[in-house]
């Protein structure tokens, strides 16, 4: 245990020391000597970000409700705290009991974003845990990982002992129980791994060998033993009303990114946007019932005292009982001044009416995500909205008194031309015109339009997984073009750093040969790569060179359908044939109807049950 | 409508949370405890309460005060019990009573007493400390440099803090550890932070580590007819 005196010496020297003290409302303090297995939930970014993540609250409470397990939290210390810790020989510690992380049985990282991978290494290093799984010995914790990026686990293959692919609620309990058995029998690390290799959703990278073709593509993935599964099938919870959801959440002291009660209303998405990984990997759509959600909301507000409830899902408008849910929540909580936020709404007139009601309690901004500037390109990506709908929604919103609008786009989408880029500007200007064509008395506030254009990163398990990403140079030209043509005092144009997106593309579709680049870059100072002021592009380029790995091979190369992709061994339910079919339809600009309209045969029903399928 | 005056303490790890964090903490605790608090109007309604004075991050206290506006009166003892049930360890409601006073707490308070624990860089005899303190308080002028923001620019200004110091007592001297008790001007009528007093000690020649110290607020006082009174 790290003593309070030790921490007192450093905490006054860092920004927001409350990030490092734990001690919040609703944490678990358990007697460690009574525990049969301990788990450190590790979030590879700062506290402010990690505490906003729903998965943390779910797993934390799920594990801690078990008498034999203790789950504590740990986040990446910000650079000021890291320096204090290194200068004063303080190892990375858990927030609840200030126990050094290397004393835990499991350290579980959640992979939300590729650019957090170096933070994993930094956290292992601060914990004095060997970076590579092959160097870990008996007594070292098992380093495990899950979350959306685990659907292509290979870039972390040398680092992580095993992955949980899919929704971890049940799997993690199975693993922990198996571990208790192993511990009682006193078996080795290797033997424990052998004992869990057939638990659905578990992937142990060291149990496989990869061979390569002469052109550097993958030839084959070979299990080292016959009983190791050739395919890893993701795990899902079939019925969300039967799935664990916490009735309390830890209440942070400092302001976090999303500081509120989170209600997860469904998993999956019926839409099938072709760039979107979440829309594919989380299928099938499964809803939680309104009654269940209302009861959860009540318990969560009672336990936290939060002033806001956020409804969490992909494409929230597709929830079948949205109006009932929202009306009930407003009725229940307006007197207590508890606001409601629906971050992922399709903005049609129905939604606007609903938002209007919500705004009576607390005011929020409006965000639209057309994703692409032209109708042609929106059809290519299967984003089923057209310009008239969008302009009408904006007009309605202005009529109702809004004056701040954000528009989200991506540049570098497959088949994009200058015309499509011009469409981004065009749409922004049309939105502006809508505001100024209002009658004077309706114009409220001062108009502010923000256009954000991020750089498209092709992801595994999407119809665009075979596409080359634009080069940094191509992105730069496009960004400059947009900057040149968007010239209006009412419109702010934001870009993303193309270099960061380039690296993201490498790790989103990398194979296990990029593990060593990660380690090399980390050793030379790369960390917090998702933070603009910390990102060190040169360090990365040197690391690729030193390890003789060409990043363009992963980011900018077009794959053919026959190529063995690094993530092909994972079965997400949606078939490769479906993804190919979607990619071909994209090239022709043909739309695919959403799952509520008709089934497009994505393949999910073959292996998985649940929801509308 | 009723104004509840509340005294609370802030100890242990809670000293690492900022004033803004403390406000949020109370907002949520009031809701958890079902206190019928008044809300402000507007787009971002906030429960109506105000603190006597902000406590710097890192400082503990036995004498913090806040006024809370309630829609209806509840029994103060119920308030204390319900709040203490939902507050994290380290924050505790000590007293609560209704007040008719209209003036804000910040305008009412005048003085604040503190315990300050300092580290001497070299061992010093007790007499020398007492001599230092006597000389210190005998001066008419104790100047320190204060950074102030004026029209968006930082301006450094020299200010005299002597009048803002009422007294300083030596409580303990043990090896290199020095504990002083002091009474400093606090509130909207004038304010001296104990951190600035420490700066002044250093400047006037007390051989201390001016980066590592502990500050604990004991109590806040008002002044009536030249006499100090607790709230």
Image (cartoon, coloured by chain):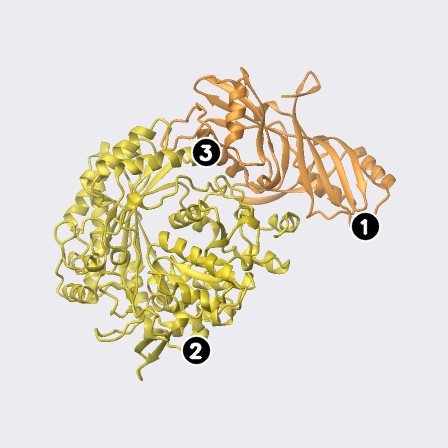
Q: In the figure, the yellow chain has which letter?
A: A
Residue under label 1: B122
Dot 1: chain letter: B
Per the model, the C-alpha gap separating discs 2 and 3 is 52 Å
> Which hue belongs to chain B?
orange
Q: Position of residue A403 (x, y in %)?
A: 28, 40
Labels 3 and 1: the sequence-earlier one? 3
Q: Secondary structure at mark 1?
A: loop
Q: Position of residue A23 (x, y in %)?
A: 54, 43
- Looking at the image, how many numbered discs can be counted on the residues? 3
**Marks 2, 3 in one chain:** no
Q: Secondary structure at mark 2?
A: helix
Residue A161 seen: no
Residue under label 3: B28
Dot 2: chain letter: A
Residue at 50% across, 54% down: A38
Residue at 60% across, 49% down: A11
Q: Quadrant of the C terminus of chain B?
A: top right
User: In this rendering, is residue A56 above or below A376?
Assistant: above
């Amino acid at each position: 245990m790290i003593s309070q005196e030790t921490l007192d010496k450093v905490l006054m020297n860092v920004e927001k020391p409350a990030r490092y003290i734990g001690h919040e409302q609703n944490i678990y303090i358990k007697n460690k000597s009574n525990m049969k297995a301990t788990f450190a939930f590790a979030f590879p970014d700062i506290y402010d970000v990690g505490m906003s993540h729903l998965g943390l609250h779910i797993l934390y409470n799920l594990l801690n409700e078990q008498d034999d397990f203790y789950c504590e939290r740990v986040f990446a210390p910000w650079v000021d705290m890291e320096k204090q810790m290194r200068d004063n020989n303080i190892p990375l510690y858990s927030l609840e009991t200030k126990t050094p992380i290397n004393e835990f049985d499991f350290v579980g990282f959640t992979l939300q974003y590729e650019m957090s991978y170096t933070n994993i290494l930094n956290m292992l290093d601060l914990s004095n845990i060997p970076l590579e799984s092959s160097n870990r010995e008996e007594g070292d914790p098992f380093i495990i990982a899950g979350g959306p990026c685990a659907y292509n686990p290979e870039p972390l293959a040398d680092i992580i002992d095993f992955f949980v692919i899919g929704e971890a609620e049940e799997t993690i309990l199975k693993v922990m129980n198996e571990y208790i058995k192993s511990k009682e029998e006193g078996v080795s690390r290797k033997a424990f791994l052998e004992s869990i290799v057939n638990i659905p959703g578990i992937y142990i990278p060291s149990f496989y060998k990869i061979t390569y073709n002469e052109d550097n593509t993958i030839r084959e993935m070979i299990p080292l033993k016959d009983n190791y599964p050739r395919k890893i099938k993701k795990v899902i919870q079939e019925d969300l009303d039967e799935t664990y959801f916490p009735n309390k959440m830890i209440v942070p002291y400092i302001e976090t990114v999303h500081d509120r009660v989170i209600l997860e209303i469904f998993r999956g998405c019926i839409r099938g946007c072709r760039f979107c990984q979440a829309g594919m990997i989380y299928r099938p759509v499964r809803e939680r019932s309104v009654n269940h959600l209302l009861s959860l909301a009540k318990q969560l507000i009672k336990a936290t005292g939060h002033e806001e409830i956020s409804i969490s899902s992909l494409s929230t408008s597709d929830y079948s009982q949205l109006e009932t849910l929202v009306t009930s929540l407003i009725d229940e909580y307006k007197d207590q001044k508890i606001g409601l936020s629906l971050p992922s709404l399709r903005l049609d007139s129905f939604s606007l009416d609903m938002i209007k009601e919500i705004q009576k309690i607390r005011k929020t901004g409006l965000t639209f995500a057309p994703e692409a500037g032209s109708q042609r390109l929106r059809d290519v990506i299967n984003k089923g909205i057209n310009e008239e709908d969008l302009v009408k929604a904006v007009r309605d919103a202005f009529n109702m008194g809004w004056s701040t609008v954000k528009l989200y786009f991506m540049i570098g989408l497959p088949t994009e031309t200058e015309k499509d880029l011009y469409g981004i500007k065009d749409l922004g200007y049309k939105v502006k015109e809508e505001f100024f064509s209002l009658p004077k008395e309706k114009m409220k506030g001062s108009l502010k339009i923000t256009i954000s254009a991020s750089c498209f990163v092709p992801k595994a398990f999407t119809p665009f997984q075979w596409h080359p990403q634009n080069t940094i140079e191509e992105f730069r030209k496009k960004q400059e073009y947009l900057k040149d043509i968007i010239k209006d005092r009412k419109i702010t144009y934001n870009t993303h750093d193309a270099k960061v997106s380039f690296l993201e593309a490498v790790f989103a579709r990398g194979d296990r040969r990029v593990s060593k680049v990660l380690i090399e870059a980390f050793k030379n100072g790369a960390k917090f790569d998702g933070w603009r002021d910390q990102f060190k592009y040169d360090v990365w380029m040197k690391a690729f060179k030193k390890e003789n790995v060409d990043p363009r091979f992963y980011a900018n190369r077009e794959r053919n359908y026959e190529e063995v992709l690094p993530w092909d061994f994972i079965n997400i339910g949606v078939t490769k044939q479906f993804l190919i079919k979607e990619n071909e339809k994209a090239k022709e600009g043909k739309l695919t109807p959403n799952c509520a309209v008709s089934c497009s045969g994505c393949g999910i029903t073959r292996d998985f049950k649940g929801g509308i399928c | 409508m009723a104004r509840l005056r509340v005294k609370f303490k802030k100890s242990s790890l809670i000293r690492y949370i900022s004033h803004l964090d403390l406000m949020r903490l109370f907002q949520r605790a009031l809701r958890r405890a079902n206190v019928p608090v008044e809300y402000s109007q507007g787009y971002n309604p906030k429960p109506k309460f105000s603190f006597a004075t902000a406590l710097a991050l890192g400082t503990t206290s036995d004498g913090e005060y806040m006024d809370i506006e309630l829609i209806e009166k509840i029994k103060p003892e119920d308030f204390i019990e319900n709040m203490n049930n939902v507050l994290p360890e380290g924050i505790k409601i000590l007293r609560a009573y209704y007040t008719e006073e209209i003036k804000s707490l910040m305008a009412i308070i005048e003085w604040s007493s503190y315990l300050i624990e300092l580290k001497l860089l070299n061992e010093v005899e007790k007499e020398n400390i007492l001599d230092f303190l006597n000389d210190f308080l005998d001066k008419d002028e104790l100047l320190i440099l204060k950074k102030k923001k004026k029209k968006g620019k930082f301006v450094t200004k020299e200010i005299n803090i002597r009048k803002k110091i009422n007294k300083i007592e030596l409580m303990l001297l043990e090896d290199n550890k020095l504990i002083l008790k002091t009474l400093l001007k606090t509130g909207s009528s004038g304010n001296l932070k104990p951190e600035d007093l420490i700066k002044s000690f250093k400047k006037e020649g007390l051989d201390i580590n001016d980066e590592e110290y502990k500050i604990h607020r004991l109590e806040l006082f008002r002044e009536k007819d030249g006499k100090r009174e607790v709230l």
